[in-house]
Image: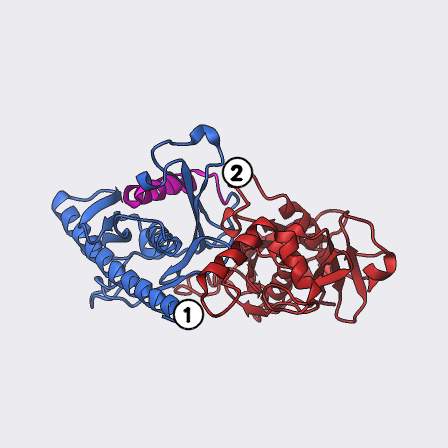
Amino acid sequence: MGPMNGSGDLSSEMEVDAFRRLFPLWFHERHLLESIRPDGRSLGRARDTTLALGAVASADGSALAKIGCTTMLAAIKMEVMTPTVESPDEGCIAVEFHMPPICSAIVRPGRPAEVAPVVSKQLSDTLLRQVVMTFSGMIDLKDLSLVSGKAAWMAYLDIYCLDADGALFDTALLSAVAAFCHLKFPMVSLNDDGRVVVVSGESKGGKSGKEAVNKEQRKLNLISIPFSLTCTLHNNYILADPTAEEESIMETLVTVILDSSLRLVSFYKPGGPVLAFTSAVM
Amino acid sequence: MEYVNPEGIREDGRRPLEMRHLHAEIGTVARADGSAVFEMGNTKVIAAVYGPREVQNRSQQLNDQALVRCEYTMPNFSTGDRMRKPKGDRRSTEISLVIRQTMEACILTHLMPRSQIDIYVQVLSADGGTRSACINAATLALADAGIPMRDLVTSCSAGYLNSTPLLDLSYFEDSAGGPDVTVGILPKLDKVTLLQMDARLPIDIFEIVVQLATEGCKAVANYIHEVLLENTKQLEYRRGL
């Protein structure tokens, strides 16, 4: 939150900063009248996005996503488990979204943020969705099966928010999808009890002598990749990709998720003032 | 098991008195008042400082000094196997307490009465020496937040395996079961604020290992000084001075 004007006039700088803190709504509305936002973006413009795959060396798949200042680290660890009786050839994915107190001044240790379980639920719905007639989820759980009825993969996806500056769901989804893209299945082999066991990558002295069942580490097959965008609506203005400051003062929030064939996957508007349907769809 | 081979090289290719590669960045968490990322080899830690701000729990408010709180968490994926309880387990609580008391010793708390300073440390990747990396990251984050301190606190670990004192243990060397000494010092004042050791060690060897760890701390302090100086130059440049 640097000074508004580049010339360091101290007295007017103080006023702008104080005005921003004391009357945030007026501050932003004055900007909206000029069709611009405090950080210089136009109303429909999203922030710079960066993505880094393989951020965590100890995980099977990981990614670090940044939209503006919002930073999320996603990592996937795979474990072998026995599948359930009802679906013997399907694996399982457990999605957990954490907001540690490092990410924002509002989160206190011991009391999790209100928005964390909401984002967590939205994420697991998007990644695992199965519609009865057509299959529109991102991952086919059958892909995660090893031996039908005996062994399947359990993928633990953990997403940690390292910096919360608005558009949390977008960044979380981006990092989760990227982590799945980066995921490589660990090698497994049959140990003496006939159970499937994960073999660590490096062979230490070749003591084990077990043959790995799947030597080539294959990647997960993603069916359709979802993308999302969050917008806030205020009076008649639609602002794309809000920062935390804008989110806290604007009236309502809308999240739209599309998949790679541009079909609408999800539309989410959690309460807030009623507005005309057409303007919302636009 | 051989941790130092006969030529004097350790398992990861270092010499016994060699530290791992250090890397630090300031200002990584935009929302925090001060933040830093500190890497010692493969151990990567991010620290964020919020404060001084209003005390959240009025009953804990101290009228003559600031309240310092610290929380240490490790995400599920930071170690080899996935951990079930990332925080609230005994080790995390103990390390949180250790970091808090170490930083409290060097922050000038009497300058900020009735306020609270929160230090949150999160381990992104663990490969031994997480305690030291956390303290170093917390120091940088406090400096970035502009909180007045007596001196920087730097920390380093050292051990003794195969009759050789080793500096900056990695996870592999740490899990060997030999002694592990962690030292935290205030470099300019040359005072020790943290000293922890487990396993057994004869007293004369103990002195050697502590001396070694202190040297390591001083090397870290030099590096932190450089990083802070560079950061200040950048700030000056941006303000147009």
Q: Give the position of the C terminus of chain B as an image quadrant.
A: bottom left
Residue at x-position 26% and y-position 44%: B194
Residue A161, position in %: x, y?
Answer: 55, 54
Q: Amino acid at mark 2?
A: Gly
Say if residue A94 shows up in the picture: no
Q: Nearer the viewer, mark 1 or mark 2?
A: 1
Front residue of B239 and A55: B239
Which chain is rendered red in the image? A
Judging by the rendered image, the residue that carries numbered circle 2 is A110
Instruction: Specify the label residue B238 is tagged with.
Output: 1
Part of the protein shown in magenta = B86-108
Task: Report the label total.
Answer: 2
User: Chain letter for blue?
Assistant: B
| Residue B149 lies in the magenta-colored region | no
Q: Provide the chain ID for the residue under circle 1.
A: B
| Magenta part, dominant SS | helix
| Element assignment for label 1 | helix
Q: Is residue B221 left or right of residue A271?
A: left
**Is residue B116 something one can see in this rendering?**
yes
Coordinates of residue A216 in the picture (x, y in percent): 57, 71
Determine whether label 1 and label 2 are within 8 Å by CB: no
Residue at 55%, 45% in the rendered image: A106
